[in-house]
Image (cartoon, grey):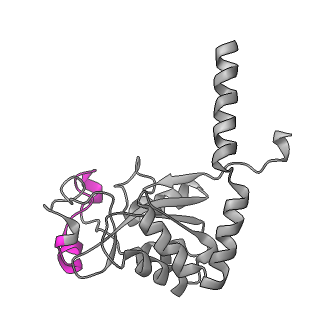
Amino acid sequence: MLALLPRPAILAHRGASAYAPENTLAAFERALALGVDGVELDVRFSSDGHAMVMHDRLVDRTTNGKGPIDHQPARDLRALDAGAHFAPGFAGERIPFLAEVLDLMKSKGEVQVELKGLTPGLPEEVVRLIEERDMIDQAVVTSFVHTLVRAVREQLIPPSQAADLERLMRALLPSEDESRLAVSRVEEARAGA
């Protein structure tokens, strides 16, 4: 049975971050060279509304800069060194724009974009950049913030289809009564064991 299942996709978290500074073009290029199926990255807005690839809100850990990424314009962020902290050979590596990483990954593998922060407009900008490059089938947008995921969904799914999708999800998900029954059966099985 397991032989019929496709193999799991191998994604490089923040690029090949064991071999190059995380969330940099060098890390994504190295991931591709290693033969991964795709990459995962994190996106935040600069103060002037550019989608920048950066995990932390503060640039301190991964660059020679200080302070919140969303308080600095892209021009200043691009001047920071995002590589020297990792190894001297990566000195001069820059914080990439999301557009640069998408251009690198076009037709080369899956791109999982995790939205970070609560900056208004980020989901819309990420979808715009993905659509502009015709990469909808190659991209997955995620976030731990449900309002950001909802904004992506609302942008990608026309209102006429959204209602159908909601009905389908309700049909597939167990009702509250079914969930309670399943939990009680598990508890009974544990008590009897």
Left or right of 66 in this view: 115: right
Q: Nearer the viewer, residue 11 or 121?
A: 121
In the rendered view of the protein, which quadrant contains the N terminus? top right
Residue at the image position 64 percent from the left and 69 percent from the top: 166
The picture places residue 43, in percent across and down from the top left corner, at 37, 67
| Residue 25 seen by the camera | yes
Eyeballing the image, is 74 above or below 114? below
The magenta segment: 71-91
Residue at the image position 67 percent from the left and 44 percent from the top: 177
The picture places residue 118, in percent across and down from the top left corner, at 31, 67
Q: Which of 29 and 133 is in front in this view?
A: 133
Eyeballing the image, is 192 above or below 89? above
Q: Nearer the viewer, residue 123 or 176?
A: 176
Left or right of 9 in this view: 53: left
The picture places residue 73, in percent across and down from the top left corner, at 19, 78
Q: Is residue 49 found inside the magenta-colored segment of the image? A: no
The picture places residue 41, in percent across and down from the top left corner, at 43, 61
Residue 187 sits in which quadrant? top right
